Every structure is written in structure tokens, then in C-alpha cells.
Image (cartoon, grey):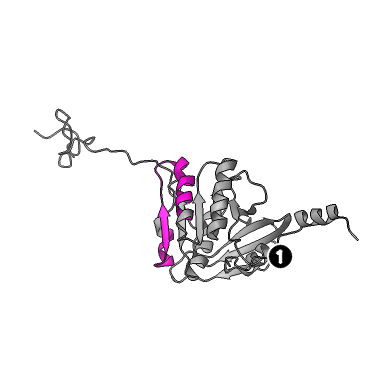
Amino acid sequence: MPSPLLARLALVVAPPPAAADALPTGLGDLDAALGGGLPRGRLTEVVGPLGAGKTTLARLLVQAALARGLGVAWVDAARTLHPGDWAPLGEGPLRVVRPADPGRGPWCADVLLRSGAFGLVLLDGAPQLPRPIALRLLGLAREKDAALVLLGEETPSRLGGAVRLAVRRPADDGPRWRARPARVAYPAATFAPAGRIEVLVERGGARARVEVQHDGPAAGGLPAHPEVPDRRGVAGGPSAPPGAPRRWKGARNGGRNPPR
């Protein structure tokens, strides 16, 4: 008969049981590795370098949640989300919040979770969360039974035990993982060629490698600009300040001499 210490140790190192209310992703292999889908009431981290496919994978997660009629909130802390990539998803309970300061991203996620209106909340591009803030968001996700997803190039939080999806694109000339790719059909037909994303799933001490193949285009990002500069008047037009030189095109004389 095992000792109580060994029994407790087995509970710690064993993978957690599959949650009955997990949020399926629609990707068979990924759902199997996650124990049924994204865990609700827990934290999931999607990490990887730029261009690895984090946003593309997150869009698949959003699409699956919208298909189930759940509200989805995306906090675009870095203000780089490309609106055109989300148009094919059609109408649905999807809300995008773009704070002026990336540091306000966790506060926005806090408010969205407290509302209880969203079954999936994603925080993208925020600075690494301090442990107290991460614990507070995790507590709200448990209270509201929501799936909380953090996206970043490195570890977005300092919490141990979070489910992690490490994303990278497979090299064209590299070895292939033998996992059967899960395919997702997009509603629109005018899309770029399909792509593949390799995902290393870390959950409860267990690891599994999954290849996700999607039929839609890769989701891109916009350059990170906190604000658009006001350039009114720099060309010497009607809104130029008094005394500013007037701009002339010089089209008739080839641009050699200003008009009289």
C-alpha cells in the first residue's frame, strides 16, 4: 500500500483530468493534447517568436469559441491586430479592446473577465505580468468559468502550472512531425494557400507535439505605433500655419522654377 506522501506526489506530477467544460478548439490532435480543449478557469500561454503563427493559432481558437456562441474579447495591448484578418469570421460576439498604453492591457482583461460576458479572453502584447496580477486574473477566470489566453514572444506570466502552447512554423526542408494535421475550413473561398503550425503542448508535466494545418491565410500584424503623428500643415497647404511657405507642384515647367 503506497504511503500518503507517495499518493500526494502522484497527484502533483500526474496530468490533470480532462475538464468536462473545456472549450474545444475544433482541432482534433490539439484537443486531445489539451484534454478536450482550452481549459476554462485556467491560464493558457501561447508563446513563440515573431512570425511563428501565434496570432493565426489564436484566430482558430476564437473561431471555435464564436461557433459555440460564446463571447470573445481580445485585448490588443500592442495595437498590432490587423482588422482585415478577422473579417472572414463574420458577425459574432467578438470585441477588440486597444488600450493606449500596453501596461493597461491587464486592467482591460480584468474588467472583461469581471463582466462575465466572455467565455474566452485573450491578452496580446502586454508586458510580462507580475505574479500578483497574474493570480488575480486567474482567480477571475475561475470565478467566471472563462478561458484566459496570454500571447507573447516569451513567458507572458510568472505562474507555474499554466498550460503552454509553444508555436513555431515547420521548416520547408526540415523533418516533419508525424502527428496527423487537423484541418479547419474557413467560410470564405478567396484565401491565401494553406499553412502549417507546429505546437508543443505542455500540460500538467506532459508534453505533446501537434501539427495544425489551416486552410486560411496566416494572420498578420500591423507595425506597433502608439499614435499617428499629426502632419497637418507640413506641406504648406491650406491648413499650414501663418508664414509657412506655400507648396507648389511645378508640373508645367518640370519642377525647375516656381510659378510667378
Picture coordinates of residue 219 (x, y %)? 48, 57
Q: Is residue 173 in sight in this rendering?
A: no
Bounds of the magenta span? 85-113
The answer to whether residue 36 is seen in the rendering is: yes
Q: Is residue 14 above or below residue 124?
A: below
Answer left or right for 8 relative to 100.
right
Badge 1 marks a residue whose secondary structure is loop
Residue 147, position as x, y percentages in the image:
55, 59
Q: Nearer the viewer, residue 84 or 114?
A: 114
> Quick one: 43 or 114, which is closer to the camera?
114
The residue located at (77%, 57%) in the rendering is: 11
Q: What residue did someone put label 1 on?
A: 178
At x 55% / y 43%, what residue is drawn? 133
Q: Nearer the viewer, residue 258 or 93?
A: 93
Which residue is located at x 70 percent, y 61 percent? 177
Of the pair 90 and 158, the residue shown nearer to us: 158
Q: Look at the image and tell me in which quarter the C terminus lies.
A: top left
- Looking at the image, which residue sits at the far top? 243
Question: In screen coordinates, is 53 left or right of 85?
Answer: right
Q: Is residue 99 magenta?
A: yes
Residue 35 lies, in percent from the top left, at: 67, 65
